[in-house]
Image (spheres, grey):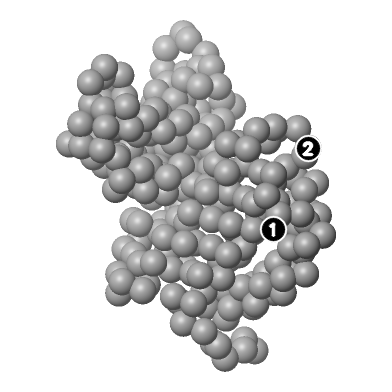
């Protein structure tokens, strides 16, 4: 039986941000692990229990800062910026969900995580950046993130053994368009699914066009975000990830 909820969502947000800030600090030349670990482990335990009480998944797999040290020193997070980015992506979804709860917003089924971790992290980061972007470069960066989200999506669902090529070209690992076209054509075969195939292709073409514009503004970035989200939701529906439990 789950324990009774002991704190409100606002308090839980503060504790999660405390964990995140500590993890950033020890991995970017700030606090020493020896000095911060006792308080970190205590806070981690409180957060982990509270998330389970809320039936929410804890995105942080590091209950001890030495375990976090082992992760960031493994070689693929060599810079301070790469560590900050890794943590921002790791905590983004849970913090956004809790903030929506505080604001009284209930996510629709099409806003819930797909269960593809990298896709969910990237689309969460896209929405965060869209809400704060003010310059042309920041809007262009959103287009690049949309491209990354579609590549990750395609890599999650495409299987060359199950989804034969529509032409003579074998898709590369970053050829999201061909991978998704092959997946959709195989999964939504037949004339009755022609409209669904056309919708997905049109959304992809819109996202792709906006990603490659040399100039960018809020409307273009928002359209690119919406088109990318539409493709992700269509594929999530087709794959069964939106089916009621």
Residue farthest top in this picture = 168
What residue would you read off at disc 2?
74
Circle 2 crowding by C-alpha within 10 Å: few under 14, some 14–19, many from 20: few
Q: Is residue 60 visible?
A: yes
Question: Nearest the camera: 227 or 36?
Answer: 36
What residue would you read off at disc 1?
61
Judge whether 230 appears above or below 191 on screen. Answer: below
Where residue 87 appears, x then y in whole percent?
58, 49
User: Which SS class for mark 2?
Assistant: loop
Horizontal placement of 18 versus 142: left or right?
Answer: right
Judge whether 127 appears above or below 5 on screen. Answer: above
- Name the residue: 64% across, 58% down: 22
Residue farthest left in this picture = 219
Gap between marks 1 and 2, in whole Å?
15 Å
Tell me, yes or no, whether the two marked residues, 1 and 2, touch with CB atoms within 8 Å. no
Question: Nearest the camera: 101 or 184?
Answer: 101
């Amino acid at each position: 039986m789950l324990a009774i909820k002991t704190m409100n969502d606002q308090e839980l947000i503060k504790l999660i941000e405390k964990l995140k800030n500590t993890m950033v600090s020890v991995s970017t030349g700030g606090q020493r692990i020896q000095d911060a670990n006792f308080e970190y482990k205590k806070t981690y335990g409180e957060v982990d229990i509270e998330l389970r009480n809320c039936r929410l998944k804890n995105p942080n797999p590091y209950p001890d800062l030495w375990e976090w040290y082992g992760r960031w020193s493994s070689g693929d997070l060599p810079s301070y910026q790469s560590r900050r980015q890794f943590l921002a992506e790791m905590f983004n979804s849970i913090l956004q969900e809790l903030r929506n709860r505080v604001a009284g917003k209930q996510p629709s089924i099409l806003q819930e995580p797909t269960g593809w971790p990298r896709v969910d992290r990237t689309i969460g980061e896209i929405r965060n950046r869209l809400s704060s972007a003010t310059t042309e470069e920041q809007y262009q960066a959103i287009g690049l993130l949309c491209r990354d989200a579609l590549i990750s999506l395609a890599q999650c669902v495409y299987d060359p053994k199950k989804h034969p090529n529509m032409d003579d070209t074998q898709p590369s690992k970053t050829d999201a368009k061909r991978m998704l076209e092959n997946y959709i054509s195989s999964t939504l075969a037949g004339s009755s699914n022609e409209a669904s195939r056309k919708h997905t292709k049109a959304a992809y073409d819109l996202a792709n066009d906006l990603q490659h514009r040399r100039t960018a503004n809020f409307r273009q970035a928002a359209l690119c975000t919406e088109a990318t989200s539409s493709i992700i939701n269509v594929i999530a529906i087709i794959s069964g990830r939106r089916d009621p439990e």
